[in-house]
């Protein structure tokens, strides 16, 4: 009887996740019912939002309970189809993939669980990066919330990550001047290649002094992918009418949940008239198709390039997650099966 | 030779202002030049933003240096006119009044320094309250930033103050459910009369528990007129997609300036997808005439009432400012000359 390997959550981590946060289990191979497809996983996407899914507390989405299959997006190949719209051999991208070697999908499920066709002309795994959820995140963060004007200064943290790389390039297309923050000189060299005018290594620089030097007129748009000390340093340097996209929290997500989201100094918020907004990309899913079409056009025009960091083998999925959380990856973290 | 009394700033206060923060001086009576008018002050407006004008640090507007006449809005009567559009005996409202018994004004100065006619049918000092800058502040805070939907919960701090009173009534007109926070039971009874569904005395209640009870579904819109502990308590209870208007900072404005406006927990900002925006009403001055026309219509229809707290005599202007800052006023703080 063929079996299906899957990673299930062993326990909610207290602090950073480790490979022992999950355990590998065998399950029976699933059977597709009417209207369903059976797929074989080819790529899994590791993203910071997944840390929230294994926290015990409330979040914006239902989490994973111990014993359940870990959630996550991926790319898969159709190996059996009971759906008239899907043929064996087609490639599918879905947020409902999960950490499992095979899955039964309902391709027509609405919203984020939908099964999406891979657009022609791009590698399949791109639909987990610039041509998928991270790309949409960067797109809506800048075009709907940050809205930089030509010549404005945009600071992007975790700038060599999946969202950050796309954000640099969109901000440049919008005519903005980009200051990229990342954790190694290699990453920063890549950010310069993508168009960043100034770069800051948050592990070695005095971040406040570096921001003062890089942003003499203050920060007009802050694309915050980390929270924590970088957040604090940039928030202290907002320009008048600044816009802040609170998108990621990788620097603080392993800490105990804090209910308080108060501002340390509301006075400065008034002086700057800043606007600070939390971004969850799933709120903007209605813009997905239009945004991804736009990104694809920019890619065809040579305006979007993207670096991936690929580990090989289903056994390494937890390891890949942990290195992504630690910032040891360089580029979008993927696992190829 | 006729003299003109004026209050000048004696020194930048270190902590709360006291009456000794200013000193009364005699100055020569000013002479209106071509196109100018000479006015006699009838009402002076005391507002929390004025605390920022006597701080030494940078603010959104130029401050008052020691030895200069204190800034502030007021209502005055034209006593001499070299301007064809203004006749002796007319009443004028302007943000450029200053703490002086007479002033020479350029009625056509653009922006906030403009001299405005008092609309017919209202008492002149209303143009310093619901029919003026504080009313416009409440209007743009709710209609441009907070945008409560019918049935949503709007929490308003300093709710019996000049901005708060109008905000309660506009939020009610928009169909929202209002939770008012103020510092005495008398003030809260007034807030109930204005339409607040729930009231919280921040000096006697456990504010967190009171907010939990008053806002079981969380806070959809927070009109923050104080900063400080009330800010923190409300921010911890934002509903999904909450909107926060950072309008006032009376609870913290006497403290040393803090450059940091970082969020204590950006995670919650993402979970709630809240939007937090600093409001300086002078940014929205282009909406003034339309907003005040709307407010006047609501007033004629009986939807806007407004309580004033009036001290008598030019000698008492600093005292009036200090009692307003301490929350000892009940309603919009004014001085009648």
Image (cartoon, coloured by chain):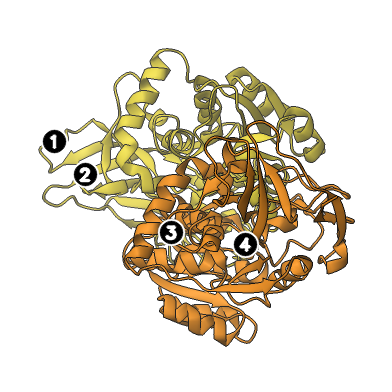
Chain colours: A orange, B yellow
Q: Distance from label 1 to label 4 (Cα)?
A: 49 Å
Q: Which mark lies nearer to you, 4 or 2? A: 4
Q: Position of residue A167 (x, y in %)?
A: 47, 64
Q: Badge 2 sits on which subunit?
A: B
Q: Position of residue A319 (x, y in %)?
A: 77, 71
Above or below: residue A193 compared with residue A49: below
Picture disc at residue B60:
3
SS for dot 2: loop
In this rendered view, identify the residue nearer to me: A42 or B229: A42
In this rendered view, identify the residue nearer to me: B40 or A91: A91
Q: Earlier in the sequence, mark 3 or mark 1?
A: 3
* Same-chain check, marks 2 and 3: yes
Query: Residue at label 4?
Result: B262
Q: Earlier in the sequence, mark 1 or mark 2?
A: 1
Query: Residue at label 2?
Result: B107
Picture disc at residue B85:
1
Q: Distance from label 3 to label 1 (Cα)?
A: 32 Å
Does any portion of residue B62 appear in the rendered image?
yes
Q: Which mark lies nearer to you, 4 or 3? A: 4
Residue extending furthest toward the front:
A1
């Amino acid at each position: 009887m063929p079996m299906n390997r899957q990673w299930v959550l062993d326990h909610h981590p207290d602090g950073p996740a480790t490979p022992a946060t999950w355990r590998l289990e065998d399950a029976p191979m699933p059977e597709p019912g009417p209207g369903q497809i059976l797929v074989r996983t080819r790529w899994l996407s590791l993203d910071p939002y997944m840390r929230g899914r294994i926290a015990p507390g409330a979040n914006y989405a239902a989490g994973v309970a111990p014993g359940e299959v870990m959630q996550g997006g991926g790319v898969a190949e159709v190996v059996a189809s009971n759906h008239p719209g899907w043929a064996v051999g087609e490639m599918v991208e879905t947020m409902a993939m999960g950490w499992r070697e095979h899955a039964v999908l309902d391709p027509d499920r609405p919203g984020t669980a939908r099964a999406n066709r891979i657009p022609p002309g791009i590698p399949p795994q791109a639909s987990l990066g610039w041509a998928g959820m991270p790309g949409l995140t960067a797109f809506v963060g800048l075009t709907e919330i940050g809205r930089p004007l030509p010549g404005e200064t945009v600071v992007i943290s975790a700038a060599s990550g999946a969202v950050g790389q796309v954000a640099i390039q969109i901000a440049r297309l919008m005519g903005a001047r980009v200051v990229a923050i990342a954790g190694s000189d290699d990453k920063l060299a890549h950010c310069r290649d993508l168009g960043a005018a100034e770069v800051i290594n948050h592990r070695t620089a005095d971040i406040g002094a570096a921001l003062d030097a890089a942003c003499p007129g203050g920060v007009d748009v802050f694309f915050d992918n980390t929270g924590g000390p970088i957040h604090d340093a940039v928030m202290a340097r907002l320009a008048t009418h600044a816009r802040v996209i609170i998108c990621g929290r990788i620097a603080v997500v392993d800490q105990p949940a804090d209910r308080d989201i108060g501002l340390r100094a509301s006075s400065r918020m008034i002086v700057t008239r800043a606007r600070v907004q939390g971004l969850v990309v799933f709120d903007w899913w209605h813009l997905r198709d239009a945004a991804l079409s736009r990104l694809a056009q920019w890619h065809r025009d040579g305006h979007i390039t993207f670096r991936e960091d690929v580990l090989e083998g289903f056994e390494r999925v937890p390891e890949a997650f942990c290195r992504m959380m630690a910032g040891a990856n360089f580029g979008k973290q993927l696992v190829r099966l």
